[in-house]
Image (cartoon, rainbow, N blue to C red):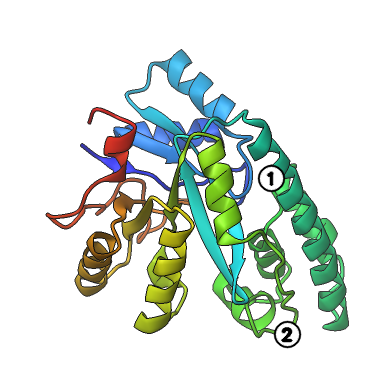
Amino acid sequence: MRVDLHSHSTASDGRLSPTELVRRAAEQQVDLLALTDHDTVAGLAEAHRTIAEENLAVRLIDGIELSTSWDSIEIHVVGLHIDASHPALAATILQQATAREERARELDRRLEKQRITGAYAGALALANGATLTRAHFARFLVEHGHCSSQQKAFDQYLGRGARAYVPHHWMTVAEAVAVIHAAGGQAVLAHPGRYKLSTKWLKRLLSLFVEAGGDAIEVSLPQQSPHERANLGQWSREFGLKASVGSDFHYPTPWQELGKNLWLPKDADPVWHLFTDC
C-alpha cells in the first residue's frame, strides 16, 4: 500500500489545486493521502468532492499542518484524521490567520527597507485567497528578479537571520497538540530532521512533544539519507511514538513526488493503523 500523509494544495502554498492534487495522487497510485495545508482546512471539501465525483482510487485523510514556536524555532505539527469543522480548530485557524497577516505586513515593511516594494500585494496576489505564507513572498522575489530561486529568497531575505526576517509568534507545541486532539485527530511532529537541530536538541524537542501528548513523528521523507531514516525510526520507538510518512508535497519536482520512496523501517509502528484498517 502506498501512503503519503503530508501534502499541500493551493489552499496554502502548494501549486496544485485540491482537485489536481487528488488526481495526481491517483495517477501515482497513492492509496492513502492526507491533505495537510498550512493552518487551513479550506481545500478538503473540494478534494473529497473530486474523489467522489471521479471515483478516484484514493482514500483522503482530513489533515492540517499547524505552525508553532519553540525556543524561537518554528516547529510544524501535522494533525491527521481531524474533524475539520470542530469549533476549537476553527478558532485556532482564525488565530493563526491573524498572526500570519501581522507577520506578512511586517515582512513587507522590512523588504521596503531593502528597496523591494510591492511585496505584500504581490504575495497576496500569488496566494489568490489561500493561506498567505513566506513561500508566496519567495515566489514574488523570484518572479520580480530579486532572487534566482525560492531557496535563495529564504537565504537572503526570508529565513531566520536573513535581511528581512520577521520572528514568528505562533502557538506552542502543546497548544497545537491539544487542539488536534480536541478535533479528534492524531498529532504528528513534522519533518524532525529539517530543523537543523543537534541530536541533543532534537531529543529535547521529542521529549517536549511526548510530554504534550504528541502521537507520532514523521520518520520517512523524500531526500533523506538511510542513516536519518533509521535514526528517526529508532527514536520513534525510544519515545513511544507512532511513525508517519510524508512527502511534504507542494508541486512535482525531480526530487519530490506524492508517495515516492516513503517506506518505514521494519520495526516502526505506522500511525495510520490508528484510523484505518490498512
Q: Which mark is residue 48?
A: none
Quarter of image, res 266? bottom left
Seen at 16% across and 58% down, the residue is: 265
Q: Categorize mark 1 by other alpha carbons within 10 Å: few (<14), some (14-19), many (20+).
A: some
Seen at 75% across and 79% down, the residue is: 164
Name the residue furthest front: 211
**Residue 26 on image: x %, y %:** 34, 31
Residue to which mark 2 is pinned: 163
Which quadrant is home to the C terminus? top left
**Residue 186 on image: x %, y %:** 43, 43
Residue to which mark 1 is pinned: 92
Residue 137, relative to residue 264: is it above or below? below
Q: Amino acid at mark 2?
A: Arg
Q: Is residue 189 left or right of residue 19?
A: left
Q: Nearer the viewer, residue 82 or 53?
A: 82
**Residue 153 on image: x %, y %:** 64, 75
Q: Amino acid at mark 1?
A: Thr
Residue 272, relative to residue 170: is it above or below? above
Name the residue furthest left: 266
Which quadrant is home to the N terminus? top left
Q: Nearer the viewer, residue 254 or 225?
A: 225
Distance between mark 1 and mark 2 Cα atoms: 30 Å
